[in-house]
Amino acid sequence: MALGVVPRARRRVRGTAPARSAEDWWWDRLAPSGSGYHLLQSDSMLLVLPTPGPARARAQRRAARRGRRLRPPGSRPAEAKAKPRTSSAPAPQQGPDPGWGDRIPLEILLRIFGLLVEANGPMPFLGRAARVCRRWHEAASQPALWHTLTLSPPLAGRPAKGGAKAEKKLLASLEWLIPNRVIGGRTLTEGQLGNAVQLCLCCRPRFSQLQRLTLIHWKSQLHPVLKLVSESCPRLTFLKLSDCHGVTPNTLIMLAKACPQLHSLDVQHSMVESTAVVSFLEEAGPRMRKLWLTYSSQTTAILGALLGSCCPQLQVLEVSTGINHNITPLQLPVEALQKGCPQLQVLRLLNLMWLPRPSGRAATPGPGFPSLEELCLASSTCNFVSNEVLDRLLHGSPNLRLLDLRGCARITPAGLHDLPCQELEQLHLGLYGMSDRLTLAKEGSPLLTQKWCHTLRELDLSGQGFSEKDLEQALAAFSGTPEGSHPALCSLNLRGTQVTPSTVSSVISSCPGLLYLNLESCRCLPRGLKRAYRGPGEVQWCLEQLLTSLASVS
């Protein structure tokens, strides 16, 4: 008897429904079983999310596709044969919803893609966007979006053998992509593109509108790439070669002839033969507007071509040192440069030991740079730029807006005051790492601010040895503006100067547009305030702290 009672008790327990809590009841009410939704509980909210459909295994999908390919043309699957026909009239077939991507007008897509390309460049965004749908492919294929491009081998920075292999791989992709989509019936696989070029976007119509091209880390295949560019990019206007090797005269001459609109060349930090640059300037010199060079022993020949009026329309000239500092002085005659490049607007001689040739007693002054707006002679080492050299450079430049003389310790406020420019907006006189070894001027800073207090937007006096009283008089000029107008000053660097709390608080109160203030290493300021302030909030906080400290002292 006992053996037969036990199973019946077990059956009664199994058939009894478990007790449900109130929480389970609410969960079933919000997302019933079979509704296609499920609940996801987080710390502060309860989400009702759609349940993803069942995913088929990869092997099952492959087997289904293989079965469809191997099926004879007239055969039908067993399921289709066994299915009875319920009606003679065929049911209307409804195509899949194209989705929101196809419903966006093409003009709106072009506007959105244009903003993204302007911010991040066309690659790799356009290559990925073209795979979304046909409408996106059409928008991403517009030539107007392909006006700027940067190409770099995907294995840049790795061993030399791997880098050369990556360059050949990318070059093969470009040779196929730019002229045609298919060569000899062969379709390029996606893996051959590396990380820089996408398969579905690069072809001749798109590159025909290319205007700005940057090549980085090309060591062995630079000549074939530039040859391909010369054949497919007739509207190229700007070319930058960064950390590239093997630039020959024939390559640049070929590019200058094939691209009649090319007017800007940047070969900084690249191993380029001077003869190649000189040959390029002789071919494209009359239309050249911008030129960037790295100073080396071969730069003299290039500068000689410029002095010989090879580029009469040149507007931007920048010569800087590379990673390894060159201690060989640069000898550049000022008057000859003014005659060879009369249209120069920007002149930058950065971190160079520039040794200007003396003008001589009977030498006539040069024509000057009447269109010059920016002059940068910044250097981290001592240079030979003096008031006399600066006057030779700027005596005919009334439109100067930016003057960067960082490191030029021989320039005095009196020499700057005699310059003909009346609307200077940026003045940088900072001395970094060298003020302790030099005898600096103790006074004269009011000459600078009294002349340009209405136009200066950025002023850098870091490391200068002006006295407390001299700085107080200089910065007081920003408080003497006419009633109803405010100074345009938005950046002030007083690092390492003898500025006092009252002077700083006065200039902050007088310049409501001040966005940057550097007070590092200012010995006369209280502790805790000797730092850089960025943004109007931090600048106003500094003013409050200075006023509090002044009130406590008084």
Image: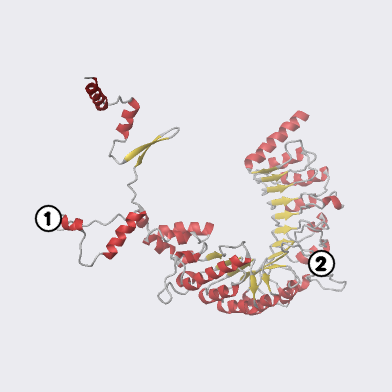
Q: How many residues crowd mark 1 within 10 Å: few (<14), some (14–19), many (20+)? A: few
- For mark 1, what is the residue? 87
- Residue 121 image position (x, y, % from top left): 52, 60
Quarter of the image where one finds residue 259: bottom right
In the orientation shown, which residue stands out farthest toward the top?
A: 1
- For mark 2, what is the residue? 355
Q: Earlier in the sequence, mark 1 or mark 2?
A: 1
Q: Does residue 326 show up?
A: yes
Residue at figure coordinates x 76%, y 40% from the top left: 503
- Model colouring: secondary structure
Residue at figure coordinates x 25%, y 64% from the top left: 71
Would residue 3 be found to the left or right of residue 187 on screen?
A: left
Quarter of the image where one finds residue 181: bottom left
- Residue 1 image position (x, y, % from top left): 21, 19
Quarter of the image where one finds residue 248: bottom right
The vertical placement of 192 against 223, above or below, is above
Residue at figure coordinates x 74%, y 51% from the top left: 460
Q: CA distance from mark 1 to mark 2?
A: 97 Å
Give the mark toward the camera: 1 or 2. Answer: 1
Would residue 76 be found to the left or right of residue 423 on screen?
A: left
- Quick one: SS at disc 1? loop
- Quick one: SS at disc 2? loop
Which is nearer the eye, 324 or 347?
324
Which is nearer the eye, 395 or 248?
248
